[in-house]
Image: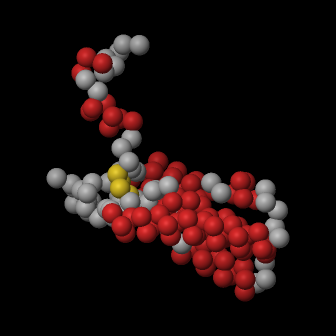
Amino acid sequence: MPRAGTVSSAEGVVAGAPRRWLGLEGLVLLAGALIAFGALGQPWWLVPAAILAPDIAMSGYLAGTRPGAHLYNLTHATLLPAVMLGAGYWQADRLVMALALVWLAHIGLDRLLGTGLKYNDRFTHTHLGDRPDARDHLDRVPAAARPRRGSR
């Protein structure tokens, strides 16, 4: 049974056709953001230089799963980069718009790859499914094949 404030692995997970639509939506966001980036005339080296910047938010997990999930979700939802894009447009700042578009491309790529927004019980539990980490795989390994404590 999940702790208070958490959900089970299956609860709240998008599956079937809606999940495929979200993947397609991610592809469209990725492609659209990169096409718009190209139209701004900014140097393409900005894309590989900044594409993983939103993942710095994973460092929030050092403070625990709850603050980690909140920080991760804040940087992996479209709200902040959309506001940044609007502010860049309002100020006619092509670099700000370009960085916002790279951020949106990152979010689109994550959705396309099936990485969703996080629940606060563990890093691997997202709205697009549960991606077990390496420790979970030990449950499926026969006891005789598991590494023993203290052995090398």
Which residue occupies the foreground of this view, 122 or 60?
A: 122
Q: Nearer the viewer, residue 150 or 46?
A: 46
Q: How is the image coloured?
A: secondary structure
Horizontal arrangement in the rendering, residue 141 relative to residue 89 (left or right): left
**In this rendering, does residue 74 appear at all?**
no
**Residue at 79% in and 60% down:** 44
Looking at the picture, does residue 92 appear above or below residue 117?
below
Q: x, y (%) of residue 104? A: 60, 68
Extreme left residue here? 1
Total tally of numbered discs in the picture: 0
From the viewer's perspective, is residue 115 above or below residue 142? below
- Which residue shows up at 66% across the image and 77% down it? 85
Residue that extends furthest to the top in the rendered view of this protein: 151
* Displayed quadrant of residue 125: bottom left
Residue placed at 33% from the left, 34% from the top?
Answer: 137
Quadrant in the picture for the C terminus: top left
Tell me if I can see residue 114 in this picture.
yes
In the rendered view, does 27 fall on the left or right side of 84?
left
Q: Quadrant of residue 89?
A: bottom right
* Residue 32 x/y as whole percent: 64, 72
User: What x and y, as percent, mark residue 88?
Assistant: 72, 79
Looking at the image, residue 135 sits to the left or right of residue 104; the answer is left
Q: Nearer the viewer, residue 85 or 39?
A: 39
State the image coordinates of residue 132 (x, y, percent, origin top left): 36, 44
Q: Residue at x 22, y 60 (%)?
A: 4
Query: Nearest the camera: 75 or 31?
Result: 31
